[in-house]
Amino acid sequence: MYDKKACQKYRLTHPEQIKERNKKYRLVHPEKMRVCRKKWRIEHSKQRREYQNKWELTNREQRKEYWLKHPEIKKESHRRYFQTLKGRTAQRKANAAKRQLSFVPLNQHFNGSCSHHIDTTRVIYIPTEMHRYINHNITKNTKMDAINLLAFNWLEAEELYTQTIK
């Protein structure tokens, strides 16, 4: 039978043993802990976001001072972020927005690829060498027919290739 008061008393009198037991459990069951943390983050996402926004508002000046004192840390943090897939995608979207283009990818990014706008909205990831093979400009509409034909042929061939592998 479960005695709630006895458990509370034990927790209050033996905190070090409980910490040690929990630490061992986390080390032995890392996958379970990962699943639990993910579940908790999903369930508490709204509260976490509210807390984070509140913290941002109250500590804005401290953060500014920190980044001014440590520009090398900020630079390294940005460099690492923009090397991730999420960071590279964010950078591409920002560059497209700066050029007044939308960014809707039609296929997945892969190593050695770059994004090619087939029109002002849609993007196809094609090999970098192919993209540089024909000089083109979407805003002036120079040589867009040629590069788009090349890109669509490559995309069709790539889809056929991936279908035959499966």
Image (spheres, rainbow, N blue to C red):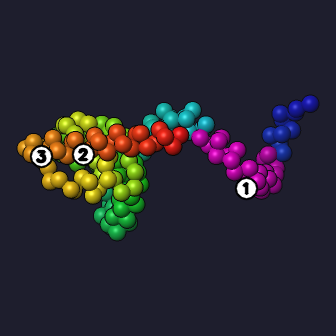
**Residue 14 shown left or right of residue 156 in the figure:** right
**Residue 130 shown left or right of residue 160 in the figure:** left
Residue 150 marker:
2
Q: Earlier in the sequence, mark 3 or mark 1?
A: 1
Residue at mark 3: 143
Mark 3 to mark 2: distance in Å? 11 Å
Q: Amino acid at mark 1?
A: Leu
Q: State whether residue 83 is above or below residue 58.
A: below
User: Residue 163 at x, y = what percent?
Assistant: 47, 38
Tell me, yes or no, whether the two marked residues, 3 and 2, touch with CB atoms within 8 Å: no
**Residue 32 position by quadrant:** top right
Is 101 one of the magenta-colored residues? Answer: no
Q: Amino acid at mark 2?
A: Leu
Residue range (magenta)? 11-38
Q: Within 10 angstroms of label 2, few (less than 14), some, or many (20 or more) residues?
A: some
Label 3 residue SS: loop
Residue at mark 1: 27
Label 1 residue SS: helix
The residue located at (17%, 53%) in the rendering is 134
Tell me, yes or no, whether the two marked residues, 3 and 1, touch with CB atoms within 8 Å: no
Q: Earlier in the sequence, mark 3 or mark 2?
A: 3
User: Residue 131 at x, y = what percent?
Assistant: 24, 52
